[in-house]
Structures are given as C-alpha cells and as structure tokens.
Image (tube, rainbow, N blue to C red):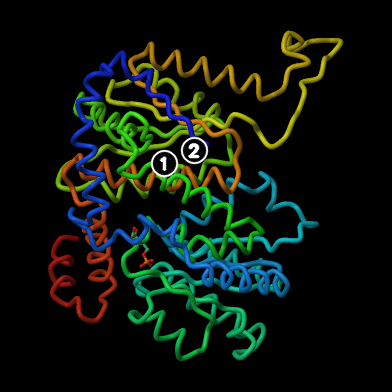
Amino acid sequence: MNHIKLDISKVYGFVPEAEINKSESAANVALKKLYNKSGEGNDFLGWLDLPSKFPESLISDIEKTAAKLRSEIDLLVVVGIGGSYLGAKAIIDALSNNFAWMKTETAAPQIVFAGQNIGEDYISELLEVLDKKNYGIAVISKSGTTTEPALAFRILKNHLEKKVGKENAKKKIIAITDHSKGALRKMADIEGYKTFIIPDDTGGRFSVLTPVGLLPIAVAGFNIREFIKGAAEMEKSTSPEIPFSDNPASLYAATRNALYNKGKKIEILANFNSKLIYFSEWWKQLYGESEGKDGKGIYPASVNFTADLHSMGQYIQDGERHIFETVISVEKPASKFIIPKDNDDFDQLNYIAGKRVDEVNKMAELGTMLAHVDGGVPNIRISIDTISEFNLGQLVYFFEIACGISGYLLKVNPFNQPGVEAYKTNMFALLEKPGFEEETKKIKSRI
Ligand code: PA5
C-alpha cells in the first residue's frame, strides 16, 4: 500500500495540468527504458528491483552482524562519503530522537560519521571522543579508493589498533565494498575483516537499500525489514503497469521537468521537521549527481522550515523567479505537546494555548505554501503520515525511480558522475601523487 501522497495542484497556476499530462508518453517511455534496461547507464540499475528481490540470507546476515556489534560496542564510526554516507545518515537522523547524541541511557550504540570531509579538527576531535569509547568501525567505499574515507580509515584503524591491539581491532571492523576490486577489498581480505558487498550494478547514491545503508541503520536499532518492505511497496506503485495518472514517480518527474522547461531551474526541498534535514542532503546528492550534466539539470537545494523562513524566506518569496518548491510534509509527529496557558500572557500567545505545537507548525506550512505560490513559486507537496521505517523506504524508492525517469526526460545519463573527477585530479596534482606528474606541472603553472 502506498503511504505517500503527492499533490501537484499548486503547480497548475504555472504549468497547466494539460501541459504536464502531455509528458505522459515521454514519462512512460522513460520508465520502460529503466525496466527494459535500454537507456544510458543501464548497467547501473541494480537498485530498481532490489527491494522486491532482497535476499533473505543477506537481511539476516546484516541483522546478525548488527546485533553482535550492538552487544559489543557503544559507538560505531561509519566511514564513507557521498552515497556511501548520506543514505544511512538521512535515515538514522529521521528515525532518531533529535537529542539522541546527548542521551546516555540509550541501549543502541551511538552512530557517528567520518570520512565525509578532510577536516583536521573533525578527525582530531573525533579521536578525543573515541579515546574514551568502546567503538567499532564500518568502512564503506564502493571504489575503495576515495581519498576522504581512505584517509579517515587509515587514521581510525591506527587509533583502534593502538587502543585494543591489532587482533581485537580486526573483530571490530566491518568493510562494505566491491566484491573483488579496490584497495579496501584487498585490505579487508588480507586483514580478515567481516565484509558486505556493494553490488556492481548499484551506484553510490542509489545504494541506501544495500548493506551500505542497511548495516548502519540496523546497528542504530531500526527495523531494516520494514524499510525494505516500504521500498518494495513503492516499487509496485511505480512500475510500468501503473497508469501515468496513478504513478506518483512519473507525475513528480513530469511535473518538475515541465517546470524546468518553463525556466524554474532550482528545486528547493523543504521540510517542517528537523529530523529530515539530512534526508534533504541525501536527496540533493541523488538529483544533483544524476541530472547536473551536459550543461543541463535542475539545481537541487534545500531549506529547513520554519528556521530558514527567517533567512532564505525573503529570497524565496521575492527574489529571482527561477525556483519551485517541493515540501515533504509529515502529517503526525512522533510526540504530542500541548501549548500551556499563561496567566500573564506577556507574549500574547494565549490565543494558541491548548493547541498542539504541531497545529501551529501546520498553519506555518499552509501559510508558507500559499505565500510562496502567490509570490510565483510553484509548490509540489509530498506527504507521509508518520516518519517510520516503512514510510522512509517508500520515500527513498519514490525519489530514486523518479530520478531515473527525470534523467531520461532531460536526456542525460542519470547513472554516471563524470564531473566529480575534476577536483580529484587537481587535488592529486597539487599533492604530487605518483602518476600525476603531467597534471602537477600544468597546475603549478596556473598558481
Ligand atoms: O554517487 C556516487 O557514486 C558517488 O558520489 C559516491 O557515492 C562517492 O563518491 C563515494 O564513492 P565510494 O563509495 O566509491 O567511496
């Protein structure tokens, strides 16, 4: 059953419904291309039917490994960047208490991330914390050669080995990587780490429903079966058998494509729930890396409301009219809190006393949507009833398949990311990495 509701009615004032419906055949062709594996990047479609075909043996291996880690450590450092980091971070944050990092009584190990930057302060301050913790490491890299996680893992491995001894450290390290290639695979095999495989046909940003996302999510104590089940339900709801008008992924893809063709070049993903901040970060990688190429693509941005209404609100309301907004709305928050009455009423808020805090939030959401539409910002609304493993699984798969359709509508290969190499080449040249002598000479003449 589909628990996600998509409302595109607040786009019709900018692009008439009939015009969006004109994309029906193009969206159907794009969806079929994904299923027939006949489009560009067709060797990276492993994620497409993964939820419905997820091997039971792999789920239980992940669950058993997670349970063992949960009983042995009080903190897990997840090392990875991009698709090897953002999915797990997004789902764990969405399902966690906002202040989980401050809670000491929790049974689940704390999950922290490393290798997603090259900050000397970040890694040094993390090591200070780890000095006092009984911790394990999950190192995640599909290529096994990405500089940021490789560097962080070198430092962390060294720290853990010094702390507990080389042999004990081996039992506290899990590697998630390619089945045969790359430096991390080689190291894991030689050191004898427990490993999980990132399938060859699944790119980093589409890998949250593989061990890349599932192991950290399970260690954090969340139900990965429900997460996969939600994704599998969305797989059914977005398959080529579903007519365009009932297929939320095709409709979302066609709508954003129609808006792009009308000059709306920026999509801002907005949330009114702080648990979803990193969900937007995951979404930005998914759409940014998939669509931003060949001089084309909607720029994916994000805002966290109502906080950002007091910073970005002015621009959204009144700045250049090249924006549309997609709001993820959570119907029911996890908690219930009633606003108290105050006899003095100095703040003049007694008019909302007795209401839930969420009622105020919902009115802020509605008021914002109407204001932004009035200001020339088309609005797409995606709502889920609660933040749960099942609903997040639905949301993840919805955005993944819509991203594939969108990429083909835009006539780009949504499954490569050639542009991310440019900074790496320059960095290696500047660091005088062996093999980059020519690039080093060239770059030195420019600085
Ligand atoms: O989407 C992608 O494939 C990339 O952004 C990767 O996720 C990112 O570069 C990390 O790569 P790796 O897992 O090989 O270390």
Left or right, 24 with reference to 395? left
| View quadrant of ligand 1 | bottom left
Decide which of tag 2 and tag 1 comes sooner along the chain. Answer: 2
| Residue 395 at x, y percent in the picture | 47, 43
Seen at 67% across and 61% down, the residue is 110
Left or right of 50? Residue 308 is right
| Residue nearest the viewer, comparing 252 with 87 | 252
What amino acid is labelled 2 in the image?
Asn
| Apparent side of residue 137 relative to residue 261 in the rendered image (left or right) | right
Residue 247 vertical placement versus 364 (above, below)? below
Which residue in the protein does label 1 denote? 237
Classify 10 Å Cα crowding around label 1: few (below 14), some (14-19), many (20 and above).
many
Q: Note whether 396 is above or below 350 in the view shown.
A: below
The residue under the point 49% across, 78% down is 195
Question: Mark 2: is the Cβ under 8 angstroms from ligand 1?
Answer: no
In front of the other: 126 or 406 = 406
- Identify the residue at horizontal 59%, vertical 29% (top origin): 331
- Crowding near the residue tagged with mark 2, few <14, some 14–19, many ≥20 C-alpha atoms within 10 Å: some
- Asked if labels 1 and 2 touch by Cβ distance under 8 angstroms, the answer is yes
Label of residue 2 in the image: 2
In the picture, measured across the screen, residue 70 lies left or right of residue 293, that is right
Image quadrant assignment for residue 333: top right
SS of the residue under disc 1: helix
Tag 2, which secondary structure? loop
Question: Real-space Cα distance between discs 2 and 1?
Answer: 7 Å
Which of 129/243 is in front? 243
At label 1, the amino acid type is: Ser
Residue 44: horizontal and vertical position, in percent?
28, 61
Tell me where residue 98 appears, x and y as whole percent. Answer: 66, 44
Q: Residue at x 30, y 36 (%)?
A: 253
- In the image, farthest residue toward the front: 241
